[in-house]
Image (tube, rainbow, N blue to C red):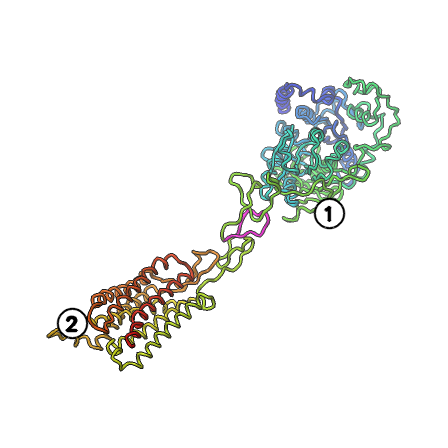
Amino acid sequence: LSLHMLQLLILLVFLSLIWSKPGSAAALNNCVFLVEEEKNSLYEDGDVVIGGLFPLHYSLVWYRTMTFAIGEINQRSDLLPQLKLGFHIRDSCDDIPVSLRASLLLVNGQPERDSRGPESDSNLGCAAVQRTVSPVIIGGAASGVSMKVNYCLLLYQVSYFASCSCLSNQREFPTFMRTMPSDAFQIKALAQLVSYFGWTWVGVIGVESDYARFAIQLFLEESVQYGVCAAYIHVYPVLLSQQMASSKVIINFCLESEMNVILREIQRRNITGLQWIASEAWATAKSLWEKFGDLLTGTLGFAIQRADVIPGLQQHLTNLRPSNIHESAFLAEFWEETFNCRLNGSVNSLSHGDNNYIDRLPCKGTEDLSDIYSPYSDVTQLRVSYNVYKAVYLVAHALHDMANCSVRKGPFLNGTCADLKNFKSWQLMYYMKRANFSALGEKVSFDQNGDPIAYYDLLNWQRRPDGSLHLEKVGFYDASSPAGRSLVINDSVIQWPVGKQVCFLQTGLRSCSPLTLRKGEPICCFDCVPCAEGEVSNKTDSLECSRCSKDTWPNKARDLCTPKTIEFLSYHELMGIVLCVVSILGACISLSILAIFFTCKDTPLVRANNMELSFLLLVFLAVCFLVGLLFIGEPSDWLCRIRYPAFGISFSLCISCLLAKTAVVLMAFRSTLPGSNVMKWFGPNQQRASALLGTAVQVIICLVWLLTSPPHANNNTDYHSATIIIECATGSAVGFWCVLGYIGILACTCFLMAFLARKLPDNFNEAKFITFSMLIFFAVWITFIPVYVSSAGKYTVAVHIFAILASAFGLLFCIFAPKYHQME
């Protein structure tokens, strides 16, 4: 009792702070007036009295479903046969202060001045005060109300319509359960829905409440993985702006009352073609259709699971008569509004001051709810009512399990069981959280957070030929299904207000493959750009590009990896054919001259020009021409290891021969001096030996190169990423440049000696021709170096071959072409 008194003191202070806000009391109108007059409560006695907290002025069906379920359970012989359930129902006015006050009265069991409802046949006396204490409350409806009631009063409650994901936090709300799925599941369903239809640029609006704030936050987090982004976020009261034109798809987390205001303003501004995505808060709000049917045609929304039928409920709803509603303010108000009449002696006359009410005709007493259509008696959309029904059965099954507890095998301390006549609310909650039962053929169970397994119907607002509303089920979301199959949609039966649209930017509809995000912008704000080099994307609006393998490269559209182009100087291409022909031609010319020289070997011209060295020179020149063929064709390791040494050795032989010929000319003129015997040390054997010795140094350089870091075939992609250049890598750059350097040293020595002997008086003096050939040789190879370094791929090889051929032809023609003139 002291705990409840402390709670009441805290509550009174809290209520005084809230009700002190200007205009808040006026906004509640008749509801608060009747609460203060204690006219909005119903009570029926029982062994266990279940509390009920309902917005009675919003919907009577919910509270009537609770009384129906309790009556049904009391008539069953298989469920709580030894226990009678009662109820104590109070009006929440869907307002936090009123709900807190009503909840405290329910758990404290305070008697009322006249609390007997139309279904009560008990007399409230002293004994009834204790039985009015409710161990558990079914309610409230709104998430904000449920949060404040549970947080402030620590009550044990089962909500039938509070969906805020925040209520799943068992550390903050350990005494809370619900038969309404958490918004966390609805948000997953909404994100998958907009992704399914390709809507990536959507507007989001909601009411200023815990329900909407948490829902919007969850949606923004969940939608990121589907590439969906918010064009704008508005919180009620919504300021309609030009932003709403940027997206025709609007996800709405408002309540039915706020939707009336929003739709009225949209209608005034003549904004059409909006695709509404409704949350479960108003997905079945048929009352909006009468005024705003044109705006709502094609609306898609997730509604909580519907019961096809609750046997006996419709009869229970329509059995109200004027004779048994006089003492209940909200029932009297409902009756008067439904039949547009005035009940004599109605308590509502105290709260009505308008002339329209006074001018109404008295009710005849013969009115029958079965004779008219009203949302109250419409049982085709039993959704929230079904949640109320399951909540009552949850409490009943928990009590049934408590009653069946075996002594010494109970779940509490030392195996004890709860006393069914004097149990604690926390003991009942223990059984409720472990309840597992069936209601109307559906299995009902709860997770560790006290939430049921989520199942939603996807509804489409369709206009019938007569203009009425038809809520067509076009799919469903089942959270228990495997990933990827939880959302099922039959889009062939959907009625659309507008076509599908993807991300809508100022430049229009955008969709591309691939795309890249703007830094710091939402995921939907993108620029369509190609993938980076070496990457492809074959998915429209994909967020990432995938890299091609080492041997493949993107095509022009960059949506497929294709094999890279293989490049090397081939015999089958024009450049390779030309170089090959020129190489063979040079070798043939060299051998032809050799044949002529051999034929004319006994002539003074051939004998005077050092016949043996001339023969060797022509053979080595032919080899130089043929070495160029080693540079054509697909490189391999063995070919690369032959190519460079063959080039270096063949040119070393040629220049060594020229060097020996030049030395012979110099030595020959020195030997004409009196007393000179130089020529005996420079005979034919010595000449051949000097040529071989000059080449031996090159051979040693090549051997060292081959043994340490030999040339090898290499797949080069550094120059052209889309091309694999098969080339001969030198292995050691030092080795390659040593080979060229040694050839250069031989050429310089030869040039120097030939230059000195160029003016010697001999008709057969070759020195000046050797000098000129060396100048051409230098010009070719000095030009070769920068061109070789700057070229790439097969062109590098072509430059090398050209240098070989040019220098070889230079030697051939400069030295042997003059012989033809001399022979004449």
Q: Is residue 330 above or below residue 598?
A: above
Residue 174 in picture, x, y percent from top left: 61, 34
Residue 714 in picture, x, y percent from top left: 41, 62
Quadrant of residue 760 within the rendered picture: bottom left
Residue linked to disc 2: 670
The segment highlighted magenta reads: 534-546
Specify few, some or many for label 2: CA neighbours under 10 Å numbering under 14, 14-19, or 20 or more: some
The residue lying at 46 percent from left, 56 percent from top is: 721
Q: Could one spot residue 602 in this view of the protein? A: yes
Q: Which mark is residue 492?
A: 1
Q: Nearer the viewer, mark 1 or mark 2?
A: 2
Q: Main secondary structure of the magenta part?
A: loop
Mark 2 lies on a secondary structure that is helix
Can you say which quadrant of the picture contains the N terminus?
top right
* Residue furthest to the left: 675
Mark 1 lies on a secondary structure that is helix
* Residue furthest to the front: 824
Residue at mark 1 to residue at mark 2: CA–CA distance: 110 Å
Q: Is residue 544 magenta?
A: yes
The residue lying at 59 percent from left, 36 percent from top is: 217
Can you say which quadrant of the picture contains the C terminus?
bottom left
Q: Give the residue type at disc 2.
A: Arg
Between discs 1 and 2, the one toward the N terminus: 1
Residue 430 in picture, x, y percent from top left: 65, 37
Q: Is residue 182 magenta?
A: no
Q: Give the residue type at disc 1.
A: Ser
